[in-house]
Image (spheres, rainbow, N blue to C red):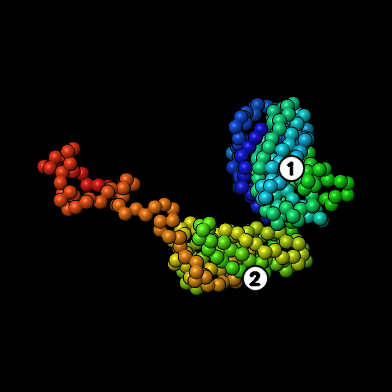
Amino acid sequence: MMRAGHRRGHVLGALLLGCAVGVAGTGCKRDAPAASTPLDAGVAAVAVPDAGSQDAGAVEKVAKPLRFSDVALTRSGDDVAVTYTLTNPGTAQGRGDACLSLHDEHGRGIDAVKLGSITVKGETTDTFEDRVRVSRGFWTQARSLLLYTTSAYSCSAGILKPTSEVSRLLPSGQPAPAGTPAFQAPEDATAADFAVSNIRVRQDSEAGEYLITYTVKNLTARRVSGAGCLRAYLTEGGRGVEEDRVGDFSLPPGGSETITDSILFDDERHWDEVQVLRLFTGPYGCATDVSEDNAGTAFNKPADVHAPPLNEDGPERDSIELNGIPSEEPASDEEALAPTEDEPEDEPQDEPTY
């Protein structure tokens, strides 16, 4: 079962991934469960959520969990392709999400991503291929991986609720050897755990993008994870007009990382109006509340950063557009006043609508 690539979804602690439930890719099928089925094949001993349900439930017991085999990992840049086979030893249909979590040398969770939705009928086998984006910084720190399935919306680097056997791997895709540190959930972080420095915002006119570079440091004696959030203001202490999540990070005790990420404003014309930028770091990116304990780092917008030219996305249009259709400017006043063959001179025309 081939599936399209997914944008990497960052998970902090026990936060649930807000991914839509569904079977992606051509040829994937979704079958309604029977009215009464045995509790096996990855079905929890509590009610199984239907596709589209946001209640993952608590997994208490799996009588016959799904089994992984033939796992292969291929990495190219920030993209990771994961191929795996799932065997359903039970009679009930197994479904949910496949998850991949990354762990450091102590087994502490770094990040978790949803690979894709899975459906495997009872007593059958199916092969899946998913492609996801994983931060290069996360991948280089990973010393082991966990591959498992779970109920929908339950991929997490914090609390595992597997409905399959958990496959422990090395980043190469090989089975993890005996003695690999056991899984540990990430510890909670606060905005005070991070310090930022060397912030730089620049505009790459040729590439048509805006970039931010900054260094973030872990001030604690434990691994902490978070994200940056850049907010833009018309004046210091004034109204904020834009914000964007800029960079995800997971740092070992005392560790630091220099991050470069693109800045995406909803309205790029605001680059000419914005005077002050403020970078926040915290466990939840732009969802982190602004407070006295998390005031961010303020700096003036660089003088050489501007909104893109008005004609950047296409050729200049000298004509007026009515209802999206360009109307040519008349060659002269006489031509503008002259009636056309289809428009008699004495017949009034409807006013144009905008």
How far apart marks 1 and 2 lie (CA) works out to 35 Å
Can you see residue 319? yes
Q: Secondary structure at mark 1?
A: strand
Query: Which corner quadrant of the image does residue 252 belong to?
Result: bottom right
Q: What x and y, as percent, mark residue 166?
A: 78, 41
Q: Amino acid at mark 2?
A: Ser
Provide residue 79's location: percent of width, then percent of height: 66, 47
Crowdedness near tag 2: few (<14), some (14–19) or many (≥20) residues, C-alpha within 10 Å:
few
Q: Residue furthest front?
A: 331
Mark 2 lies on a secondary structure that is strand
Residue found 74% across the figure and 59% down from its top: 187
At 73% from the left and 61% from the top, the residue drawn is 251
Q: Where's the N terminus, which quadrant?
A: top right
For disc 1, the marked residue is 73
Vertical relation: 68 (above or below) 280? above
Type of amino acid under label 1: Leu
- Looking at the image, which is closer to me, 183 or 71? 71
The percent position of residue 46, horizontal first and vertical second, equals: 70, 38
Q: Which residue is mark 2?
A: 197
